[in-house]
Every structure is written in structure tokens, then in C-alpha cells.
Amino acid sequence: MGKQKKEPEKPSTAWQGTYGDMITLMLCFFVMLYNPSEIDVTQLATITQSLQMNETETVTGGLSLSAGRLSDLGNNINSLPSLEKGKSLGLTKKKAVSLFAPDIKSNKITVTSDERGLVITLASDSFFEEGSAELNIEETRGTLLRLADFFKASELEGRRYRIEGHTDDTAVPEGSKYESNWELSAARAMNVLHYLADYGVDEGRFSIAGYADTRPMFSNDTPEGRAYNRRVDIIILDEGHF
């Protein structure tokens, strides 16, 4: 009898473990690079919409960001102006959080971002007496000086800002020089601008607005909610909100 042929050995699967480790490490690497503060909200919404499937058809593609350019998106994404703008505001937010660390710790200031841009919120109770638009300058001079230095920084050159005043739903006190919360909220925004201008900022790059109690952050049913709603927002405007 001839020798029995030896069956070939099954291919080794040891490489799959190494491959899996490499994919996991790459995922961790990109997660570490991800920074939510640097997202451009408008671009993200557009990309999300482009990936949605048409519910009325069984087979269909996504919606293109723009006709004939979807194939080039991977090559051009790093040069998109909106992403550069988002990256710039992300770095600006990091600087603001660092610069205003003492004020954030003492609950005088919060730094957030939304569709309008980067929002620096002044806690009204720290800056104004209730029902008044006169700044408590002795208490807040250091904060206002830091704000002025921040808005004069070279990396914010060309940016525009808006100061928005807000109140809770409590009516202005009887005998107040302000007829309603509309005048009070606008006066608070205007007085913040005047003090920043006194400290050297270019007031020509600012606009002001008063919203009274029409844009609350929280319910006015509690003292805490009303305290949060009494505020002044200083916004580094996104280009779409000039």
C-alpha cells in the first residue's frame, strides 16, 4: 500500500487576535482626538441629513452635501471653512475656560457654546442688584477686566460680539425708572458694554439686545430657576449669526 497522503494543516487564525487589537487601538486613538467643543453645528446637521435614508423607497442613497462633490469630501474635509471656524471657536473656548477659571469657580461666569457661537454668561445676581441695571463694580471689576483683555486678544480679531440681557418673569419694582423688564434687560446689556469699552474694547464690534423674560434657561417657578434666568450673555458670534 502506498503512503497515505497527509491532510494539509488548517490555516492559523492567530492573526485575527492581532488584527482585532490593532482595530481597537485605532478606535481609541480617534476617540482621544474627538473634541465635542470643536464641532461645527451646521456642518454636523448637514452631514447627518445626508446620511438619512429615504423612508419611501427600499433602496436609495443618502443626500449629497452638494452635487458632484461628495466623492471629494474625504480629500477636502480638512480645508472646509466651517470646520476651520469650528476649530477656532473650540480653541477660543479652551482659552476662555482657562482665563475665567476663578470666575467659573465662584459661579460668576459660565462658558458654553450653542448655534449662536461661544456664550459667556454673567450671573446677574453677581453683577447687578435685583431689579437694577447698575453694575456692582467693586465686586466684579476683576472679572470685567479679564473680559476686556479676552475680547482684545489677537486671535479674536475680526470677530463680532452680541451682549444679550435677560430677566426672570418678576415685574420691575414699583417706582423703578424702567417701565418693564424689556428696558431693564436692555439697560443691563448696555451697561456691560459701556464698562468693557471703558477698559479698551472696540465697541464697534458689539451689538446689544434685551429679551426680558422671553428666553428663560429654566422654569421661573422656583427661586433658583429665576436666579439662573436673570443673566447677561456675551456671545462670540458664529458667522451665520452676524
Image (cartoon, rainbow, N blue to C red):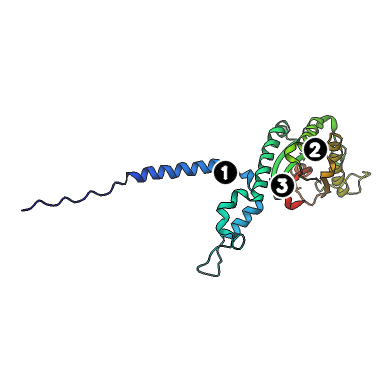
Q: Residue at x 56, y 52 (%)?
A: 75
**Residue at the location (50% across, 68% down)?**
59
| Amino acid type shown at disc 1 | Tyr
- Mark 2: amino acid: Asp
- At numbered mark 2, what does the secondary structure look like: helix, strand or loop? helix
Foreground tag (3 vs 2): 3
Please rate how many residues cluster around mark 1, counting C-alpha atoms within 10 Å: few if below 14, some from 14 to 19, many from 20.
few
Which residue has dot 3 on it? 117
Depth-wise, is mark 1 or mark 2 nearer the camera? 1
Task: Give the left or right position of residue 171, taking residue 120 as reference.
Answer: right
Relative height, residue 100 to residue 112 (above, below): above
Which disc, if any, is residue 125? 2
Work out whether residue 225 or residue 240 is closer to the camera in this orientation and state it.
240
Mark 2 is surrounded, within 10 Å at the Cα level, by few (under 14), some (14 to 19) or many (20 or more) other residues, namely some
What residue do we see at 59% from left, 51% from top? 77
Image x and y of residue 2, in percent: 7, 53
Residue nearest the viewer, comparing 136 with 55: 55
Q: Give how far apart the Cα atoms at labels 1 and 3 are.
A: 19 Å
Instruction: Report x, y in % for residue 170.
Output: 83, 47
* Secondary structure type for disc 1: loop
What's the residue at 34%, 44% (across, down)?
Answer: 15
Q: Say whether residue 168 is visible.
A: yes
Q: CA distance from mark 3 to mark 2?
A: 24 Å
Q: CA distance from mark 1 to mark 2?
A: 36 Å
Q: Earlier in the sequence, mark 1 or mark 2?
A: 1
Q: How many marks?
A: 3
Q: Position of residue 202 (x, y in %)?
A: 83, 40
Closer to us: 101 or 10: 10
Q: Position of residue 95 (x, y in %)?
A: 69, 36
User: Given contact means CB atoms under 8 Å apart, are the residues at marks 1 and 2 in contact?
Assistant: no
Query: Would you identify the image quadrant in which residue 198 lies?
Result: top right
Write down the residue under mark 1: 34
